[in-house]
Amino acid sequence: MARPRRTAVVLGAVVLVGSAVPAAHAADDQGAPQYYDSGLASTPYMGWNTYYGLGAPTEDQVRKVADHLVSSGLRDSGYNIVWLDGGWQADQPRDPQTGRLVANPTRFPSGIPALVTYLHKRGLKVG
């Protein structure tokens, strides 16, 4: 009988101490937007990924899909990200001076910065 009583006393002490310790709180010091907590999961990132639809996309194809996201209302429904996945880079994948990947000049004749500007002007994010 002494053992169950001792266990109950220790368990009770743990519960009391645990309830007295304040919960941890992380403050937002990065300027992240605040969201209403409905108790449900947050909305996941939504958009379109070149890998699943095209594999090795062209600039023209990405522009057409971006225009469709806008004209169909998908962008305004939250599908506002265009991911440029693999297949955009040149066959010689690195700039010899900087070591950075470079866009395939045949598939992306205007270059990636011009495409990103095009997407941003349509209210889309690029990843």
Image (cartoon, helix red, strand yellow):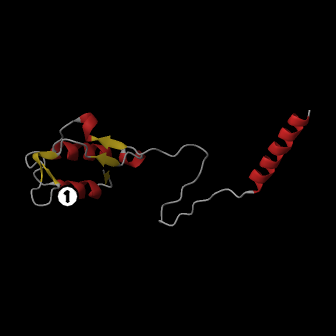
Q: Is residue 21 left or right of residue 96?
A: right
Circle 1 SS class: helix
Looking at the image, the residue that sits furthest to the top is: 1
Judge whether residue 79 can be spotted in this image: yes
* Viewer-proximal residue among 118 and 41: 41
| Residue located farthest toward the right when viewing the structure as drawn | 1
Percent x, y for residue 45?
Answer: 41, 46
Q: Is residue 15 left or right of residue 123?
A: right
Q: Report which quarter residue 88 is drawn in.
A: top left
On the image, the x and y values in percent for residue 31 come to: 48, 66
Quadrant location of the N terminus in the rendered image: top right
| Coordinates of residue 67 in the picture (x, y in percent) | 26, 47
**Residue 19 vs residue 32, the one in the foreground:** 19
The residue sitting at 82% across, 49% down in the picture is 13
Question: What residue is disc 1 on?
Answer: 113
Evaluate whether residue 72 shows in this view: no
Q: Position of residue 117 (x, y in %)?
A: 23, 58
Tell me which corner region of the image, top left, top right, bottom left or bottom right, holds residue 48: top left
Name the residue rendered at 38%, 45% in the picture.
79
Which amino acid type corresponds to the residue marked 1 in the rendered image? Pro
Q: Is residue 49 left or right of residue 25?
A: left
